Amino acid sequence: MNYRTYGTELWPFPEVERLRNQINDLFDEDVGFGSTGLFDRSMSPRLDVVETSDALLVACDLPGIDANDIELEVVNNVLTIRGEKKQHHEPDPNDGQFRNETWHGAFHRTLALPDSVNPDEVSAELKNGVLSIQIAKREERKPKRIGVEVK
Amino acid sequence: MSNAVERKNQTDVDSRQEGSSPAQRRQRRIFPAYEVYHDKKAVHLRVEMPGLKRDDVDLTVDKNQLIISGTRPEWSVEGTVLLRERRVGEYYRAFTLDETVDPESINATMHNGVLEVEMGLRKQAQPRRIKIKSG
């Protein structure tokens, strides 16, 4: 540890803090996926899920993937997003690959849906590498406002 | 002495900017994943920045530095958040270009949330076939 003197003080803590920040920065590398389990081979893309009053919205980061390579299904109220991220180019042994942090291969993610949604009313859109899924809620499960009459 | 004071101020600024609460960490800089490869004519850089449109990405070349940045805003929907795994904040990545790249011939396109930068190699850096004359 390199102690630096600032003025007359011996103050190691800024150094310690910087070291801590550098270690934290390691986790800021955006790999954009995680493995679903120890022995799973497929990648698991990141999801956001928001429940509004009339729908369940799901957003999933799938950069560089064509809509044709994505499969979406709802079975037994479980939403499954799966597909394949294709390799962008075949590496040519005569040319060079400097560095590759991206991944390719199969991906798979499931999400258990609440029973308030209607699995027949699902729409999905892929835009800027983000898959947005909208699942409508059942009519009878939407919040209702009950008017109170004053007599 | 004044150097040391400056250094202390610098360190204080660093530690102030980098918050460590979960909410602040989610808003911090994102280093997007990238891929670099080259062929005979150009160096190709592909940076994955999901959620960004073409206009959201800033690409600058300053001397030999290629800097890619862009802001990904928070997903603004009214409702109850059930799951939040996607990162938001500032995308940032800087690259150093070497002398084989011609800074005048850099082209970029955005496709499916992936920024594709094509950097032409200088003529001198491209492979050249030399004819052997018979003696």
Image (spheres, coloured by chain):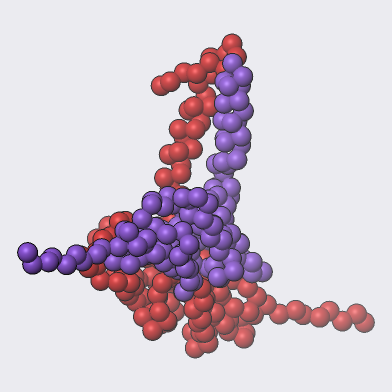
Question: What chain is the purple one?
Answer: B
* Residue at x-position 21% and y-position 66%: B129
Q: Residue furthest front?
A: B135
Residue B97 visible: yes
Residue at horizontal 49 percent and vertical 88 percent from the top: A120
Image quadrant of residue B79? bottom right
Residue B27 drawn above or below residue B40:
above
Residue at the extreme bottom of the image, as rendered:
A120
Q: Residue at x 35, y 65 (%)?
A: B42
Residue A41 vertical placement versus A7 (above, below): below
In percent of width and height, residue A106 lies at 30, 71
Q: Nearer the viewer, residue A111 or A105?
A: A105
Nearer to me, A49 or A104:
A104
Rendered hue of chain A is red
- Image spot of residue A53 (x, y percent): 65, 75
Q: Position of residue A69 (x, y in %)?
A: 36, 80
Residue A37 appears in the rendering: no
Q: Of residues B88 and A100, which is closer to you in this image?
A: A100
Residue at point 59%, 16% (across, down): B1
